[in-house]
Image (cartoon, rainbow, N blue to C red):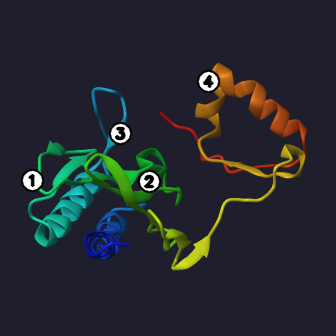
Amino acid sequence: MNADWRSRYEVMVEAARAAGQVALGYFDRGVTVHWKEDQSPVTVADRNAEQALRQRLSAAFPNDGFLGEEFGASPGSTGYRWIIDPIDGTRDFVRGNRAWAVLIGLEEAGDVVAGAAYLPAMNEMFTAARGTGAFLNGERIRASAVSDPAQAVLCVNGFTNILQRPFSTGLLHGWRNSGRCAAWVGAWTP
């Protein structure tokens, strides 16, 4: 990993943890939900966590650009851009489900070179950088070597959303019938 990527990668992990702590301060505390124009939820936790991410990343790399879920885009001059979603899974977050994450991606000249997904409620940090592999809490992970769908396990979050898509219904029906489907489904409330 080159030196520019390495320094950004290290700060990215710290920033994800810090933003996760901000969000955890609101988690399972009955925060007010506001609805965006696209009918997706947003809370004060989303906004404050994104501000924490932007502050930490821009303090270390003031000339990098940003594209954030809550506060949009701001250009940079270095060729690097941070793509951030402070709480991916806000619906789970507001329901008290632990399946939400702080997401950070790093682009260099339009190519994604690194990323982090931190699940604060589970204290799990997934990281990856081009040329180094992927890791969970610092230990290397890999894709499954299982190629036979009958021997595979499919894990789904947001199952009801997937079933609303006609192209997925047949696939998921086949998985259910295989007897090998593991699904965690959070309670659905509007």
Kind of residue indicated by mark 4: Arg
Q: Residue at x 81, y 31 (%)?
A: 173
Identify the element where label 4 is drawn. loop
User: Within 10 angstroms of label 2, few (less than 14), some, or many (20 or more) residues?
Assistant: many
Q: Are marks 2 and 3 in contact (CB under 8 Å)?
A: no
Q: Residue at x 9, y 64 (%)?
A: 62
Left or right, residue 158 beside residue 45: right
Of all residues shown, which one is farthest toward the bottom?
Answer: 138
Disc count in the image? 4
- Closer to the camera: disc 1 or disc 3? 1
Of all residues shown, which one is farthest toward the top?
Answer: 166
Where is residue 73 drawn, in percent x and y?
17, 43
Q: CA distance from mark 3 to mark 4?
A: 20 Å
Where is residue 190 drawn, in percent x and y?
47, 33
Which residue does the numbered mark 4 point to in the structure image? 165
Q: Earlier in the sequence, mark 1 or mark 3?
A: 3
Which residue does the numbered mark 2 point to in the structure image? 93
Q: Earlier in the sequence, mark 3 or mark 4?
A: 3
- In depth, the one of 76 and 27 nearer the eye is 76
Q: Earlier in the sequence, mark 2 or mark 4?
A: 2
Identify the element where label 2 is drawn. helix
- In depth, the one of 156 and 40 nearer the eye is 156
* In this view, 87 is above or below 129: above
Which residue does the numbered mark 1 point to in the structure image? 77
Q: Residue at x 32, y 75 (%)?
A: 6
User: Within 10 angstroms of label 3, few (less than 14), some, or many (20 or more) residues?
Assistant: some
Q: CA distance from mark 4 to mark 1?
A: 40 Å
